[in-house]
Image (cartoon, rainbow, N blue to C red):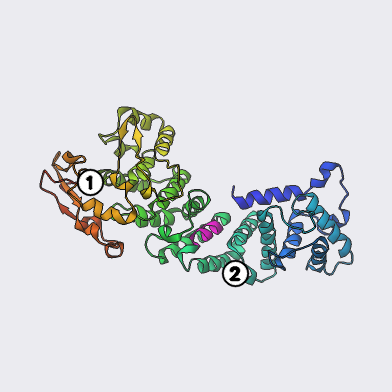
Amino acid sequence: MTLGELLIDVLSERLSGWNRRDLKSHQFSALEAVLPSPDSHLRLLGEAPASTPEESDARRDAFISRFEASSTLAANPAKGAVAKEAFDSFVLAGILSNASVVSFPLQAFREMCLAYWLVQRLDEGSEQEVMVSRWRVVSFAAAVLRRSNSFFKYRDVFERYTASLLSDVFGVFAVASVVLESQDLDLALSFIEGLKKLGQHPFNRSGGIDRDDSSKAVAASIRLARNGGFDWFFSEYLDPRYPVRFAGSAILDWVFAEWLAQVRNTLITDQLDKFKTLVRPHIDASTFHVHGIIGRLSTVVPEPVLQIEEITEELKDLILTEQPQADSVLKAATHHPNSGKDQAAQTDDSARIHGKCLKCPHERLRPGEVHGFLSMGNSREGQHDKTRSQDVGGTEKFNFENAYRSTESELGRRPIGALLQSERAADSSHFAPPLTFKSSA
């Protein structure tokens, strides 16, 4: 259930017999004769604040006058009595306050009422009000239309609205919220197409995605786009052939965690096979995603994780027999107490499972330092896991080199394979263990 659906249910309950709880079944008989349904009440209430600025003062008489002048009551001879009963019913239901200056006790109530008014304007053939409205109100309007099974009639209006918001990366969360409330496949696919036009890694640059509501909305929008959403998400962020942008990488972890929780039971074989290709490269390179994305993937594609020598037998058994519990262990191990900050700027908070430390040393660096860190060779920490640079079991080793000293703009989307060179010297040391591939590759 979305926030919009929850608000619709709450307001409908309050307006469909809230007064009868006091055994006053005929308290608003004039209102019920003209506007018998909760939806009609909300459309009337939405028109009043739509005609005035949000911050302006409004008193009881002003609200009643707006009700009388509304398109619903303007031609009704009993509009005075109906308007007064309407105001009293909204106060009794707790949707309006009865203070000297009338207001909505919750901003969400006001936004939902405006959403009902937007739907009325769409029914009247006008879409201009939608195009200039705030995204939260438009998202609630999508929820109202979906509840009445009529969203498809105005899908093109919402597509134009979301396209206007996606003119830059700062509209990503707003559009995702509209898509989430609509639960519409076609609108979700248009969202993905809009993301493609924003360039590489738009989430990292959006500036408005947090760990809670916004990451859930973005993840749900990708899920709603089905295979189109998966293909874009994987190629843009997860494909192991390309390096992950370090700056803003925590956002990727948040969105991926929410998305995986929503789709884990619906992933098809081809998608699971793609996920299996992620595990070994990230672990060999000790990327910061070992503790987030790779840990969570162990609950849906455990096979490549079980082949890793570093994890304990206890964790292997846990992955095989209690995958949901394993997911909670890994999630707890990756939790950062101050989740709003870039994890790269935090102190060493490496995950430990049964005493085993799966540490990414470069997580302690700031985003601008990670590239140089991966290519340095002379430091007291340069002996970290030195033996892993040697030939084992007929494999050929590769390591990150000077290409990681380039700026992100220079790096672009060049394949990792083009940035790697063969490492033959057994005594070579690097802070991040090298990527390892089969000789035949």
Location of residue 62 by image quarter: bottom right
Mark identifier at residue 131? 2
Q: Position of residue 189 (x, y in %)?
A: 47, 60
Q: Residue at x 17, y 41 (%)?
A: 386
Furthest toward the front, the residue is 380
Q: Is residue 175 magenta?
A: yes
Q: Using the numbered discs, state the Cα–Cα distance from disc 2 to disc 1 in whole angstroms.
A: 52 Å
User: For the magenta stretch, what is the residue range?
Assistant: 171-179
How far across and down, in percent of the image, does residue 43 sit? 73, 61
Residue 24 horizontal side relative to residue 241, left or right = right
Residue 376 lies within the magenta run: no
Viewer-nearest residue: 159 or 47: 47
Taking depth in this image into account, of 369 and 273 the one nearest to the observer is 369
Please identify the dominant SS of the magenta region.
Answer: helix
- Is residue 418 visible to the viewer in this orientation of the structure? no
Q: Are marks 2 and 1 in contact (CB under 8 Å)?
A: no
Element at label 2? helix
**Does residue 92 show up?**
yes
> What residue type is disc 1 on?
Phe
Q: Tell me the tag on residue 431.
A: 1
Point out residue 144 in the picture as x, y percentages from the top left corner. Answer: 65, 57
Q: Which mark is residue 68?
A: none
Say which residue appears at 70% left-offset and 69% top-offset.
Answer: 124
Observer-nearest residue: 251 or 33?
251
Considering depth in this image, is 277 or 270 the residue closer to the camera? 277
Q: Residue at x 43, y 55 (%)?
A: 229
Q: Residue at x 82, y 57 (%)?
A: 86
Residue type at numbered disc 2: Met
Mark 1 residue element = loop
* Marks 2 and 1, the one that precedes in the sequence: 2
